[in-house]
Image: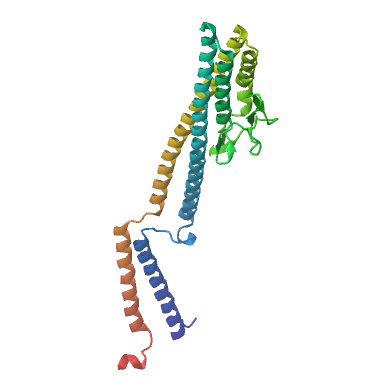
Amino acid sequence: MRITENILSNKYLYNQDKINNEKVKIQNQLITNSRIEKLSDDLFGSLEIINIDSQIKKIETYQKNIDYSKEFVKFTINSLDNIVGETQKIITQVVNIDNAVNANFSTVAQSVRASLESIVQNLNSKYNGMYLFGGTNYTTEPWSIDANGKVVTNSADLSGEVKVQISSGIKDSVNVPGSKIESSDLLATINDIIDSLDAGAAPGQALKDRLNAAYNEILSIQSLTGEKYNRLEDINTILDNQLTDAQEMLAKRKEIDPAELSIDLQYQDYLLQLSYKLASSILPKSILDYM
C-alpha cells in the first residue's frame, strides 16, 4: 500500500487531536481535583463512585428519617411525662381522701376531672399534623371529655403503628399506639374514680389497686419510649460513622495525584512538540513556510 501525503496528514492531525485531548483532560483533572469527569474516563472507577454515591444518599435519607422520628418520640416523651405527673396528682388525692376528717368529695372529684382533662389534652397532642397516640388515624381526635367530665374514646382503632425506614432493611415504629394507653386501664379507672366521688364515696381498695397498676403500666410505656429514643440516637451514630467512611472512600476514588498529573501533562506537551517537529520534516511545505 502506498502511503500518500494525504494519509500522513490525516494521521498527523489524528495524533495531534489525541494529544491535545489528553492535555485538556489532565488540565481539567488538576483544576477540578477529580480524576473522573465522565463514565468513559474510568469505567470501573466510575461504577464504584456511582455505587458509593448511592450509599451516601441512602444513609442521608435514613438520617433524615431518624431526625423526624426523634422529634416525634421527643414529643411523645414530653406528653407521657405530663400524663405521669397528672396521674400522680390523682393518686395523691385518692390516698389523702381517706385521711381527711371531713372529706369534700365534690372538691376532690373536681380536681380529678381537671387532671383527667390535662391527661386527655396530652393524649391528643400532635406532631406534624399526626396524633401522637392516635395510631394511623390522623383525622379523628382519639379522646374527648364528655359533659360529665369523664373521658370518651372517639376512635374505634388506635392500634396502628407509624413506621419509618431507619437503616438498610430495618423499619421501626416511632409512635406509641393509643391501644397501649387503653389497655393500661388508666382512663377507665379514672372514670370509675370520678363516679365513686360523685356518689359521695371514697374509692375502694380495688380502685386504688387498679389506679396503681395503670400508673405502673404508663411508667413502663414511658421507659420503653425513652429506650426507643436512645436506640434512634445509637443508630444515628452508626450511620454517622458509615457516612464518614463512605465520603472518605468516595474522595479517594475521585482524588488525584497532582505531582503525577503534572508529569503526565509535561509528557503530553513533550509529545506534542515532538509531533510538531516530525510534521515539519514529513509533511509537504506550504507557501507560508517560505515567507
Image position of 147 (left or right of 90): right
Closer to us: 151 or 256: 151
Quadrant where the C terminus sits is: bottom left
Residue 224 seen in the figure? no
**Residue at the outermost right position:** 156
Q: Position of residue 181 (x, y in %)?
A: 60, 24
Closer to us: 105 or 120: 105
Count of marks overlaid on the render: 0
Q: Is residue 177 above or below residue 283?
A: above
Q: Is residue 195 above or below residue 24?
A: above
Closer to us: 241 or 15: 241
Instruction: Residue at 35%, 93% (x, y): give it.
Output: 287
- Colouring method of the image: rainbow
Q: Position of residue 249 (x, y in %)?
A: 41, 47
Q: Is residue 97 above or below residue 55?
A: above
Closer to us: 130 or 115: 115
Image quadrant in which you'd find residue 110: top right
Image quadrant in which you'd find residue 107: top right
Q: Position of residue 109 (x, y in %)?
A: 58, 18
Instruction: Residue at 48%, 27% (x, y): give it.
Output: 226
Image quadrant in which you'd find residue 192: top right
Image position of 77 (left or right of 139): left
Q: Position of residue 230 (x, y in %)?
A: 46, 29
Residue 238 seen in the figure? yes
Instruction: Residue at 50%, 33% (x, y): give it.
Output: 75
Q: Is residue 210 above or below residue 236?
A: above
